Amino acid sequence: MHKYRTDMYEGMIAETVTVPGHNATIINAYFARPLGSGPFPGVVLIHHAPGWDEWYRETTLKFAHHGSLAISPNIYYQFGHGAPEDIAAKARAAGGVPDDDVVGDITESLSYLKSLPQSNGKAGVFGTCSGGRQAFLVACRTKGFDVVVDCWGGRVVMSQQELTPKYPVAPIDYTK
């Protein structure tokens, strides 16, 4: 993270983009980056259970403000478009997003970041709440992330009774 100076140029690009997701589906993602040639590190932000909402847009901007290529994919894309709370309710009613879908979506978002000419090839994954669980899961199941931040992600440790076809393995079990 760079130290703020009163004479700094603070230009950024921020936009909703479409990127490949799991099984070549096309998903929306909020993307922000500093202006300039870089190179910059990247970060993939995985939204929480309340959905792909304003907090994640603001946090994506904050990472870009501090010098990172930042992307937050909408992992609820399969439930349609609308108000974040309505889409999150649809996701909950369906029992959530399968782990394999999340891993695929986040892996593709990582590939998108690393393909950018401004990328320095380094990237992290960050998530809060269920996004924290998913950040831990993705870091265990894929290669390419240099750092993972799981902010209070639940269900990293799961009992046999909590496992389902959508969540067949507790994330902690990938560390064994």
Image: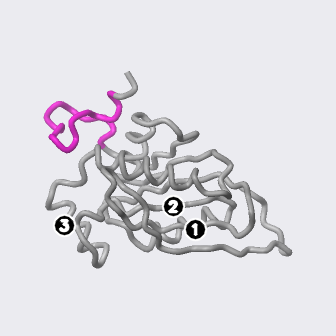
Which residue is the extreme one toward the bottom? 83
In the picture, the disc for residue 71 is: 2
Q: Label 3's element?
A: helix
- Circles 2, 1 touching at the beta carbon (< 8 Å): yes
Residue at mark 1: 32
**Amino acid beneath label 3:** Lys
Marks 3 and 1, how far apart at CA: 27 Å
In the picture, the disc for residue 173 is: none
Classify 1 as above or below 149. below
In this view, the mark in front (3 or 2): 2
Classify 86 as above or below 42. below
Q: Label 2's element?
A: strand
Residue at horizontal 31 percent and vertical 65 percent from the top? 50
Marks 3 and 2, how far apart at CA: 23 Å
Q: Which sits earlier in the primary sequence, circle 3 or circle 1?
A: 1
Residue at mark 3: 90
Residue at horizontal 20 percent and vertical 67 percent from the top? 89
Q: Which residues are magenta?
A: 155-173
Residue 102 is situated, as x and y percent measured from the top left of the image, at 33, 49
Image quarter of the N terminus: bottom right
Classify 161 as above or below 90. above
Q: Is residue 8 left or right of residue 73?
A: right
Image quarter of the C terminus: top left
**Amino acid beneath label 1:** Ala
Q: Residues within 10 Å of mark 1 (few under 14, many from 20)?
A: many
**Amino acid beneath label 2:** Ile
